[in-house]
Amino acid sequence: MPKFTVIFKNNSSKILEAASKDILIRDFSMADATAFQEDVKEIRWEEENCLCVESIASGKISRIESK
C-alpha cells in the first residue's frame, strides 16, 4: 500500500498508508469535513521515480525526479 506524508500547516508531519490519495483524503475528512483543508498544507508521495508534492491550497502537484 502506498505511503503518503501529510505536512500540516504547523510544519509537523505524519506518514499514512492508503490505497490512493483520494482515499487518504476521504478517510482523513470523515470525522471533520473541513479539518483537512484547514490543517493540511501539502501531501507528498513517491510515484514512478518521482517525488510528488501536492499543495492543498492551490491543488497544484509538483513532480521532482528522484536520482
Image (cartoon, rainbow, N blue to C red):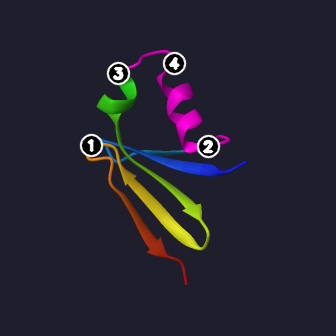
Element at label 1 = loop
Decide which of 21, 17 is in the foreground and name it: 21
Give the residue furthest to the top: 31
Q: Residue at x 56, y 49 (%)?
A: 4
Dot 3 corresponds to which residue?
34
Three-letter amino acid code at disc 3?
Thr
Dot 2 corresponds to which residue?
20
- Give the CA separation, mark 3 to mark 2: 20 Å
From the viewer's perspective, is 60 left or right of 63?
left
Task: Where is residue 21? Give x, y as percent.
Answer: 55, 43
User: Residue 57 has which mark?
Assistant: 1
Three-letter amino acid code at disc 4?
Met
- Give the CA separation, mark 4 to mark 3: 9 Å
Q: Are marks 1 and 3 in contact (CB under 8 Å)?
A: no
- Give the CA separation, mark 1 to mark 3: 13 Å
Q: Residue at x 39, y 53 (%)?
A: 54
- Give the CA separation, mark 4 to mark 2: 16 Å
Magenta stretch: includes residue 65: no
Element at label 3 = loop
Decide which of 61, 31 is in the foreground and name it: 61
- What is the magenta range? 18-33
Dot 4 corresponds to which residue?
30
